[in-house]
Image (cartoon, rainbow, N blue to C red):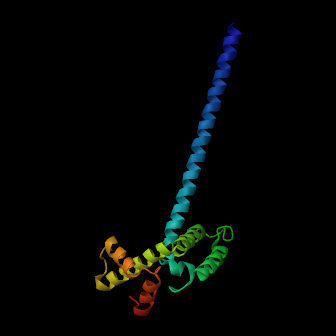
Amino acid sequence: QQQQQQQQQQQNKQQEQEKQQQQEQEKQSQKEKAERQQQHQSAAASGDAQLPTCHYEALGITFSAKESEIKKAYHLKCRQLHPDKNPDDPHATARFQRVLEAYQVLTEPEKRSGYDAQTFVEKAFAKLGGNMPVDARVVSFVQRCYQTSGVVVQEEMMDKSV
């Protein structure tokens, strides 16, 4: 009976040691994961200054680009900026995501119209004095005034360079 109790105690100790090792390994892996995420976030944050702020700039197209031109530019940029093709570039993922975001907005007529109206109003407000907040009602009004899938707003932006 004593031998059985000793064996049981040894097994319990082994199990406890194994649990502790597993917990330490989990802590270490979580720590490493957190460090990688932090590195990735800091790399992405430092790359934000290099990212184009305008959807049209991100795709390298003009305001008057047709849907086929947008699609062509998107596929070209994806091939150029894909993180797998640029493994040494810490900003590749952020650039790739920026292009994807631009494509998603510019290929949907309603989103594009809203984006164009927002950009138009932001530029107009900037000319009026800089740091004025853009009111969503103003953007909505501009979008309704130019309700032709953003085409008129785009032409206004190109013609008057507001």
Residue 123's x, y, as percent?
Answer: 37, 83
23 over 133 or under it: above or below? above
All told, the count of numbered labels is: 0
Q: Quadrant of the N terminus?
A: top right
Nearer to us in this view, 12 or 103 = 103
Residue 129's x, y, as percent?
Answer: 28, 83
44 over 20 or under it: above or below? below
Residue 147's x, y, as percent?
Answer: 42, 79
The quadrant holding residue 61 is: bottom right
At a point 64% along the width and 22% down the height, the residue shown is 12
Q: In screen coordinates, is 139 left or right of 11?
A: left
At a point 32% along the width and 75% down the height, the residue shown is 138
At a point 57% along the width and 42% down the height, the residue shown is 27
Nearer to us in this view, 149 or 6 = 149
Q: In screen coordinates, is 127 left or right of 96?
A: left
Q: Quadrant of the C terminus?
A: bottom left
The quadrant holding residue 69 is: bottom right
At a point 57% along the width and 56% down the height, the residue shown is 36
Which residue is most to the top? 1
Residue 161's x, y, as percent?
Answer: 41, 90
Nearer to us in this view, 127 or 33 = 127
Nearer to us in this view, 93 or 139 = 139
